[in-house]
Image (tube, grey):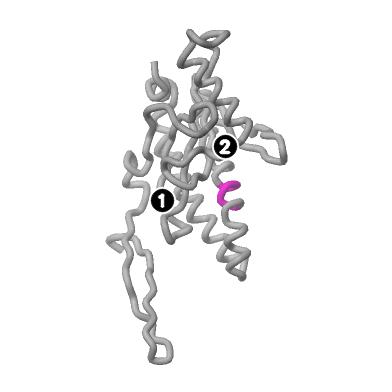
Amino acid sequence: MNAMDVFRSDFPEEYLKILAAGLRDCYRNANRLIQETYVTLEVRQNTYPWLRRGLIEDMMMSTAAQFGESISAAQVDSGHFWWHSELRAGRIVLTQCASSGEDAPVRQAQYKNELAKKTQRLLFPEVNDPPNQGIIYATLLHNKAAGSDQHVGYAQIRFPKPGLTSFYEGGVDLLVQFPDVFEQFELKEEVIEDSAIPKRIQRREASGA
């Protein structure tokens, strides 16, 4: 048994595309709301991660509700001020977390480490007591694309090990599995004339637009 086998067995595959589309929309909406609400760049930068987090946590709750008994969703008190969304399907428990890189360690939190320990209990029952009373902890790791707050740079479901510094083998790369969901865009250059001095800026545009 490995974590990916359990994930394929227990987690509704059709939900993954809904999750991918919801994540894409949360990034776009967070950027739009920040631009509309705050004038100062520094305030936008400070506020953006928290607004984006709230939108994603709420999106996970609302989209999971569409699947009835297949996925249960709850807001869980993490302690120390925070609440977080947990989706449960069979032996899978899914949360979300922004990450500093595709292979970067998961941000430390006591609840995450406790969930990861339960994964170890399920995968290695011979060294744990009681055996076979664990879950598989999966986390949606994501962050923005370089230079663009409104585009998802990566989105992967991974299985953290206890300690949260590494992962069990396997995972789901949502950008690879659902390329139609995430707009592909390229950098284009344009020249803006300002007092006869050209200034080069980069603009992200959807390909084919």
In magenta, the rendered stretch is 51-55
x and y percentages locating residue 176 in the rendered image = 32, 42
Identified at 38% across, 34% down, the residue is 172
Question: Considering the numbered disc 2 on the image, is that residue within a helix, a strand or a loop?
Answer: helix
Which residue does the image show at 48% across and 55% down from the upper left? 28
Magenta region, mostly helix, strand or loop? helix
The residue to which callout 1 is attached is 153
Residue placed at 43% from the left, 51% from the top?
152
Residue 161 x, y percent position in the rendering: 49, 27
Front one among 118 and 77 = 118
Q: Quadrant of residue 173?
A: top left
Residue under numbered circle 2: 61
Give the CA distance from mark 2 to mark 1. Answer: 23 Å
Location of residue 178 (image quadrant):
top left
Query: Residue shown at 50%/19% (left/top)?
Result: 120
Element at label 1: strand
Q: How many marks?
A: 2
Is residue 26 covered in magenta?
no
Q: State the image coordinates of residue 86 (x, y, percent, origin top left).
A: 57, 31
Query: Marks 2 and 1: which is nearer the front?
Result: 1
| 122 or 56: nearer the viewer | 122
